[in-house]
Amino acid sequence: RVRALLRKDRRTLADALCEVVGLQLAPPASSGDVFSGMDAQARLFGLPWLGTDDWAKYPNDYINACVSHCTQVFSVLAHYFHLRLPFAISKRGSSLFIRPNWREVDAGEATLSIGDANRASFVVGLSMLLYDVAFMCHRQGVRVPVEQIADVVDNLRQAVVVLASRENEARQRLPFTLDVYAVVQEVLKMYTRAGDADSGAEAEADAALRSQVHDVLRRLHLCDDAVDSVEYEDASWAII
């Protein structure tokens, strides 16, 4: 009876938390312009989340608003769950940044605010943010497949709602095996044209973006060739 009462209380708390941070499930769809199908998408504070859509077709300001909403909600939940995350978010002025959260290692940072000239850094930064979200879900006993890594609203909501359905001691304690580079590949799909009908110019642009993303990963020491080519005083840091 006590466990049943606790589950009921946790469900009330979970529902209230979802309401406070604006984790809204998708309403019925409608039709219209580039933003038309977004009526059927999940929302953060009322703002439709882009999901796995083609992010390149949306204005930078809208993308930045979505990511800003995501970081606010995620920061609240991470604080509530008392988590030390793989990547740390910071803010300077109106711009958001994210960096590896390993102690005493200065690996640089990537941006979470996209502009006209920093798409590669943003792809890596967004990948790090989505990796953090998946890590939080894992600690709550919710597995996020890499194919669903961009479904942020659903993922965050699951991490909250699970408070009501599982006991703390029953949460999954399996190793967290998600690979950062696999997340980067998923995010790249949202900014590259993988179809057979690509023009030569589009294919060149996609190849250039992939190369730039890899350069950012190397700068942040988040890919194998960068790890292999750098000597670390703390060998346990080179874990990716």
Image (spheres, rainbow, N blue to C red):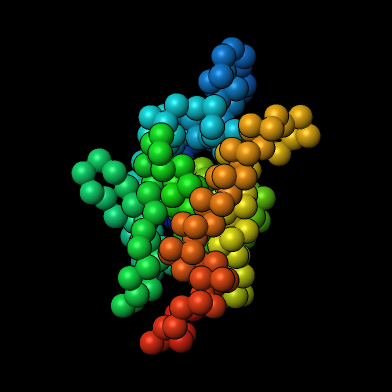
**Residue 182 location, x and y as percent?**
62, 58
Q: Which residue is found at the position 44% from the left and 46% from the top?
A: 122
> In the displayed structure, would residue 34 be above or below residue 186?
above
Q: Which residue is found at the position 29% from the left and 55% from the top?
A: 90
Q: Residue furthest top?
A: 32
Camera sees residue 214: yes
Q: Which quarter of the figure is the C terminus placed in?
A: bottom right
In-front residue for pair 216/66: 216
In-front residue for pair 107/171: 107
**Residue 152 location, x and y as percent?**
52, 45
Quarter-of-image position of residue 64? top left
Camera sees residue 165: no
Q: Is residue 108 left or right of residue 182?
A: left
Q: Which residue is found at the position 38% from the left and 29% from the top?
A: 61
Q: Is residue 239 left or right of residue 198?
A: left
**Residue 45 location, x and y as percent?**
39, 34
**Residue 135 location, x and y as percent?**
51, 63
> In the displayed structure, would residue 153 be above or below residue 196?
below
Q: Which residue is found at the position 71% from the left and 39% from the top?
A: 194
Q: Residue furthest right?
A: 196
Q: Is residue 194 left or right of residue 11?
A: right
In-front residue for pair 188/2: 188
Q: Residue furthest left?
A: 93
